[in-house]
């Protein structure tokens, strides 16, 4: 799972055994989330450490998840985002080149599209981010693009839409303090961790006035990364792919699902719009299927919500 604040990146060894190991600064991450894979605590911004580890472990491909990801925070503190996201990516890629690592799966975002007029984005939709988070990720994509054009480096940039839900087996899930993801926050209200949920903006030009997003289950997203790894190992060219289901739900529809799955009503407050939020952002997602052969298995809003709620209930019993 992605972890915020220049934290996690996963590498696979080039050996036939294809062992994986993870490096995390644990600023916002948790050791428990790594499960049984080896963990090295460190920071992507440390070039000497990164270069040494890439070489010592004979890494073949880097999966780069490290980033700060909260849109309103990026508006308040843009330098943090350009540092943790763009500058750290540049550092990691320079280390990859030094260590002769020529493949990368990059965690990007639908925020690179900004607020497309139709509310729907495909990979060639004009890129016009409306917040520093999206811009910092787009700048990272440009670095990847230019590096691939100048060398034998190859990458897959996966533009996430709204990642939601938790591991269906309840082994891991999002446990960060002060989470902002809608479904997680709503589930926290259900279990009593929060007194209410805020809807930020009820006057958008959408069917019910609230923001519309394309929600993708984290398990399906994880499988997309594995498919991207296989694609690069098989010699695939550098590419950019949307990761979404191709349909959206409004905030009110999501809350309806949470209340339906939980069997209870939650307290909701209506608040003004937040800076940097688009009205509607839904994926055109045919390309990820055709290029990677990826097919979603958990494309159902109630299924996504149920997995998130089960995880939140488990956290109540066994806090991380």
Image (tube, rainbow, N blue to C red):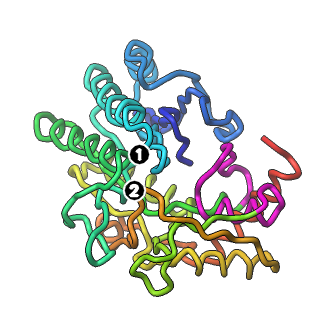
Magenta residues, start to end: 169-195
> Disc 1 or 2, which lies upstream in sequence?
1
Visible in this render: residue 255? yes
Residue behind mark 2: 276
Residue displayed at 68% across by 37% down = 36
Return the residue nearer the eye: 164 or 186.
186
Q: Assess whether residue 152 is covered by the magenta stretch.
A: no
Horizontal side of residue 249 vs 288, given as left or right: right
Q: Residue furthest front?
A: 272
Residue displayed at 38% across by 46% down = 133
Q: Assess whether residue 187 is covered by the magenta stretch.
A: yes
Residue displayed at 67% across by 51% down = 173
Q: How crowded is the residue under tag 1: few (<14 C-alpha within 10 Å), some, or many (20+)?
A: some
Q: How crowded is the residue under tag 2: few (<14 C-alpha within 10 Å), some, or many (20+)?
A: many
Q: Residue furthest bottom?
A: 207
**Where 173 sits versus 117, above or below?**
above
Assign a secondary structure to mark 2. Answer: loop
Horizontal side of residue 1 vs 129, given as left or right: right
Magenta-colored segment: predominant secondary structure: loop
Tell me where residue 121 sits by quadrant: bottom left
Assign a secondary structure to mark 1. Answer: helix
Horizontal side of residue 316 vs 175, given as left or right: right
Contact between labelled residues 2 and 1, with CB atoms less than 8 Å apart: yes
Residue behind mark 1: 75
Whole-percent x and y of residue 152?
17, 36
Visible in this render: residue 61? no
Whole-percent x and y of residue 68?
47, 40
Return the residue nearer the eye: 70 or 233.
70
Whole-percent x and y of residue 60?
37, 33
């Amino acid at each position: 799972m992605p972890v915020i604040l220049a934290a996690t990146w996963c590498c696979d060894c080039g050996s036939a055994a294809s062992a994986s190991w993870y490096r995390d600064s644990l600023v916002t991450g948790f050791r428990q989330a790594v499960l049984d894979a080896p963990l090295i605590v460190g920071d992507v911004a440390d070039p000497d450490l990164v270069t040494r580890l890439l070489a010592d472990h004979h890494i073949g491909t880097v999966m780069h998840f490290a980033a700060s990801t909260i849109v309103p925070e990026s508006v308040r503190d843009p330098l943090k985002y350009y540092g943790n996201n763009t500058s750290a990516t540049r550092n990691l890629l320079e280390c990859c080149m030094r260590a002769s690592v020529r493949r990368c799966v990059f965690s990007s975002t639908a925020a690179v599209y900004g607020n497309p007029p139709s509310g729907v984005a495909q990979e060639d939709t004009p890129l016009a981010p409306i917040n520093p988070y999206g811009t910092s990720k787009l700048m990272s994509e440009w670095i990847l693009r230019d590096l691939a054009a100048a060398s034998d480096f190859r990458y897959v940039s996966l533009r996430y839409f709204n990642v939601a839900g938790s591991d269906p087996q309840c082994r891991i899930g999002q446990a960060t303090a002060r989470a902002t993801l809608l479904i997680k926050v709503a589930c926290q209200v259900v279990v009593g961790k929060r007194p209410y949920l805020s809807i930020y903006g009820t006057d958008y030009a959408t069917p019910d006035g609230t923001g519309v997003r394309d929600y993708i289950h984290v398990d399906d997203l994880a499988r997309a990364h594995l498919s991207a790894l296989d694609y690069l190992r098989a010699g695939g060219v550098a590419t950019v792919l949307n990761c979404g289901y191709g349909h959206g739900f409004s905030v009110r529809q999501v809350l309806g699902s949470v209340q339906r799955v939980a069997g209870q009503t939650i307290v909701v407050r209506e608040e003004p719009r937040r800076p940097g939020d688009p009205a509607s952002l839904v994926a055109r997602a045919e390309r990820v299927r055709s290029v990677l052969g990826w097919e979603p298995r958990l494309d159902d809003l109630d299924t996504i919500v149920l997995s998130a709620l089960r995880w939140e209930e488990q956290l109540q019993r066994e806090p991380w």
